[in-house]
Amino acid sequence: MSVPETQPTALVLTALPLEYDAVRAYVEKRRERVHRDGTRVEIGQLPSTTWHIAIAELGVGAGRAAALTTLLISWLNPEAVFFVGVAGSLKDDVGIGDVVIGTQVYEIHGGKQTPEGFQARPKAHSASHALVQSARSAVRDMADVRAHFMPIATGDVVLADAESEIAGYLRENYNDAGAIEMEGSGAAHAAHLNGQLDALVIRGISDRADAGKRDADAAGSQELAAKQAAAVTFAVLRKHRPRQGSSASSDPEEGPQRRGDGGATYGGDHIDFRGGTFYGPVTGKTDGRR
């Protein structure tokens, strides 16, 4: 009797409740899991795909996103990580309701203060080539989404004044960025430090990062932007193929499982040789179940 492969996991992260709700609408058969430190995720299925989807609402800020993304990667062993939500536009041609797919994510606060002024020292995290390619393919079929492939700026600031000092700083040092948000660089950095892990930041535009932000938010622009970003995210996952031979388990109660060279799966305190070949003695234990 053949044993089905465990399914690959995509980790989809948000900062705000409305972003989480937009993502959650795409995930079926959800069940909640709680890490020993109290961090919660819901894990479910993306219909008609092999993807398990783990979703989490992390709260605001790049530092928080980096720490919790690192924890979730270690716990859930995903092969793709997305940070999804709303952002402010930094370009005249990137409008409310548009979606920016981050080809790079900038950390905007690094630099050196000198007597001559502040000198920026930009740090950038490149997006996964495979995910960007999947996104380019996916959005061609989405007539109701206007997508832009551009860098995204991350900073611990809510920008609501286009004439402010920070707005000028962005124009001078990050003038190719299409959007500004608060968490993407933290998640991207955590994914980078974990090696061969595909990562992508997808942001729906909810305002123009100017004095009209409050009015735009009151008109429902954040809900629209979150829904558009979520729609693109799951269109990307429907295009993106898991790595060949992927068998990462998304069930934290079982722990990460991997397929060994001989076809066995191992995880926690057990090894399953069904469907594999083993040569040599085995010493093991049983809990009485069959």
Image (tube, grey):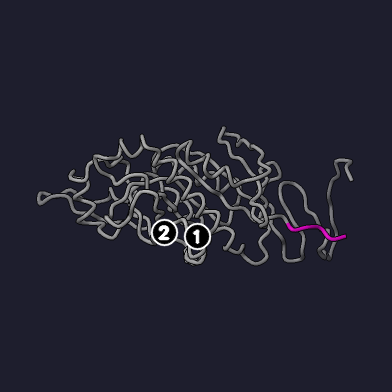
Question: Quadrant location of residue 219?
Answer: top left
Of pointers 2 and 1, the one earlier in the residue sequence: 1
**Of residues 89 and 68, the one drawn nearer to the viewer in this rendering:** 89
The outermost residue toward the left is: 116
Furthest residue in direction top, as rendered: 38
Q: Badge 2 is on which residue?
A: 147
Residue contact between numbered discs 2 and 1, judged by CB atoms under 8 Å: yes
Whole-percent x and y of residue 118?
17, 50
In this rendering, the answer to whether 149 lies above or below 84 is below
Mark 1: which amino acid? Answer: Met
Q: Is residue 2 magenta?
A: yes
32 relative position to 209: left or right: right
| Secondary structure at numbered mark 1 | loop
Q: Residue at x 82, y 65 (%)?
A: 277
Q: CA distance from mark 2 to mark 1?
A: 9 Å
Magenta stretch: dominant SS? loop
Q: Is residue 182 left or right of residue 288?
A: left
**Disc 1 crowd, CA 10 A, few/some/many (<14, 14-19, 20+):** few
Q: Which mark is residue 39?
A: none
72 w.r.t. 148: above or below:
above
Q: Is residue 263 magenta?
A: no
Q: Residue at x 52, y 43 (%)?
A: 22
State the extent of the magenta-drawn residues as a range. Answer: 1-5
Residue 125 picture quarter: bottom left
Q: Residue at x 69, y 41 (%)?
A: 253
Q: Position of residue 191 (x, y in %)?
A: 48, 54
The quadrant in which the N terminus is found is bottom right
Give the labeled residue for mark 1: 142
x then y, percent, for residue 132: 47, 64
Instruction: Report the amino acid beneath label 2.
Output: Ala
